[in-house]
Structures are given as structure tokens and as C-alpha cells.
């Protein structure tokens, strides 16, 4: 697929926006402030700090990433530039994959911004390398699913407000379904959403006990999220706006 031109165009456009840089500064500052506040509170252990920061990062992914991608295609349709893209050798999968890649890199930049704050509890002790790997896989799954929600909402919307509202509803539904799917893979009979979220993010030291097959379950969740993203690309290809 000839998507390199769209990728270069999107990356240049995002590089010119001050919000791209200030949002990362804001995200890193909030996590460092949260780490300082948690260390002075009752959760001042490595496991407690890690669970609190990972939960905050996980929640911010579901809020920020859909907003980043909700208007990426609907803006093209609203400004009349989507038809110009189809005059080139580009096709719908190329456009979707290119925009998804660029905005996925923006979402991944938030994970890299959070890395210094997440390393603090690891240095304090109580957090194993497998916990870091598990958190990375689950946060990656959240980024991919939130990205899919934004792309799907942007495909079927023209107005910015409608795209944002639809992406919020889709991402909220996926944010509820993901913990339940994770608990099912862990073979954990938990029906309360808050406990499912604790098992997913490690809040309250839920990962300190250790769960057999937890890293394998996180890898399965990541593969399922990538599969869902591919399905979203095909759905966008066969949808009415691209015919």
C-alpha cells in the first residue's frame, strides 16, 4: 500500500502543532506530580506507587487517544480534501493505516513520557520486570483499542462534535469490555468492574500476589487488540463514506 506520502504529510502536520509538544509535557508533569503525592501518602511503597501510576496512565490513554484520532478522517471529509486523496493512487486501507500509524505513534509517545515516572517504583523495589512487561502489553492494548475507537468514529462522522461523542462512547464500551476479557483469560471469576480494573492495572497492590499466566494473558489481550484494529480498517474500507 502506497501510504508513505500520507504518513509524511500527517507527521509534518502534527509536528507544526504546539499541542503535540505541550500535551506530552503536561502528561509527564501530571505523572511525576502524582508519583510525588503517592510517595507521601499511604501507598508509599514501590508496589503501591506502581499501581497508582499505572492506573492513572491507563485511564489517561482512554481519554486522550480517542480525542487525538476522532477527527483525523472526518476533518478530511469536512474540508473536502478526502476526495483529493482518492485522486492519487491511494485507497481507503492506505489512508486508514497511515493515519492510524501516525496517531498511534502519538499515543506511544505518551507511554514513553510516562516511562520516567513508572521507573521510580521499580527502583524502590517490589516491582518485577514481568510486571513492567505486563503493564507495557496492557497499556499497548489500551492504545490500540482507543485508537480503533477514534478511527471508527471518525470514519462515520463529519462534524467534530459527533466524532468526539461517538469515539467517547466506543472507547468507553471497550474500556469496560477489556477488563472483563482480561479476567476471563486469567480464569478469574470477578464480576465487579472495579475489581476487574484493579486486576488489569495493578491498583492497590493486586499484582503483588501474582497470578499464574498473567504475562501470557496480557500478550493474548495485545494480539486481540491488534486483530480488532485490523477489523476496523476493513470495516472502514467497506463503509459508505469510502465507496
Image (cartoon, rainbow, N blue to C red):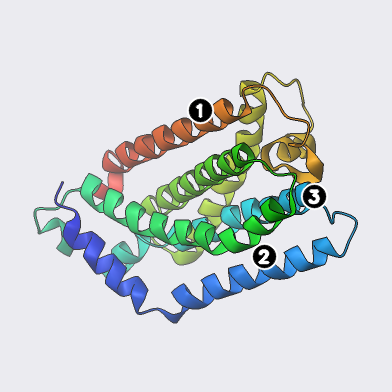
> Rounded to the nearest whole Å, what is the CA distance between mark 2 and mark 3?
14 Å
Please identify, in this view, whether the residue under mark 2 or under mark 3 is nearer the observer: 3
Q: Earlier in the sequence, mark 1 or mark 3?
A: 3
Quarter of the figure that contains the C terminus:
top left
Q: Out of 70 and 125, give the one closest to the viewer.
A: 125
Q: Please say if 15 is above or below 64.
A: below
The image quadrant of residue 106 is bottom left
Q: Dot 3 surroundings within 10 Å: few (below 14), some, or many (20 or more)?
A: many
- Where 215 falls versus 137 (above or below)? above
Can you see residue 3? yes
Q: Which residue is mark 2?
A: 31
Name the image quarter holding residue 197: top right
The secondary element bearing badge 3 is classed as helix
Going from N to C along the chain, the mark reached first, 2 or 3, is: 2
Kindly state the secondary structure of the residue where label 2 is placed.
helix
Residue drawn at (81%, 44%) of the image: 204
Q: Find residue 149 and report its horizontal and vertical position in percent.
A: 48, 47
80 relative position to 156: left or right: left
Query: What percent of the width, then of the height, locates residue 218?
Result: 56, 32
In the rendered image, which residue does mark 1 sit on? 220
Amino acid at each position: 500500500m502506497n501510504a508513505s506520502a500520507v504518513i509524511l504529510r500527517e507527521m509534518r502536520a502534527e509536528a507544526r502543532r504546539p499541542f503535540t509538544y505541550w500535551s506530552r509535557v503536561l502528561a509527564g508533569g501530571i505523572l511525576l506530580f502524582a508519583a510525588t503525592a503517592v510517595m507521601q501518602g499511604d501507598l508509599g511503597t514501590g508496589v503501591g506507587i506502581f499501581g497508582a501510576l499505572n492506573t492513572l496512565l491507563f485511564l489517561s490513554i482512554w481519554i486522550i487517544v480517542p480525542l487525538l484520532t476522532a477527527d483525523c478522517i472526518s476533518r478530511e471529509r469536512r474540508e473536502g480534501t478526502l476526495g483529493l486523496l482518492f485522486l492519487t493512487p491511494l485507497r481507503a486501507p492506505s489512508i486508514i493505516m497511515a493515519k492510524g500509524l501516525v496517531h498511534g505513534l502519538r499515543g506511544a509517545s505518551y507511554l514513553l513520557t510516562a516511562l520516567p515516572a513508572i521507573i521510580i517504583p521499580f527502583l524502590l523495589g517490589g516491582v518485577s520486570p514481568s510486571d513492567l512487561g505486563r503493564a507495557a502489553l496492557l497499556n499497548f492494548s489500551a492504545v490500540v483499542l482507543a485508537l480503533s475507537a477514534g478511527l471508527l468514529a471518525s470514519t462515520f462522522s463529519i462534524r467534530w462534535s459527533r466524532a468526539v461523542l461517538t469515539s467517547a462512547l466506543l472507547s468507553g464500551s471497550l474500556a469496560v469490555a477489556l477488563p472483563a476479557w482480561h479476567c476471563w483469560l486469567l480464569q478469574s471469576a470477578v464480576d465487579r468492574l472495579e475489581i476487574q480494573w484493579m486486576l488489569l492495572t495493578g491498583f492497590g497492590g493486586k499484582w503483588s500476589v501474582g497470578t499464574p499466566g498473567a504475562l501470557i494473558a496480557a500478550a493474548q489481550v495485545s494480539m486481540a487488540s491488534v486483530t480488532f484494529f485490523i477489523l476496523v480498517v476493513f470495516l472502514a474500507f467497506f463503509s459508505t463514506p469510502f465507496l
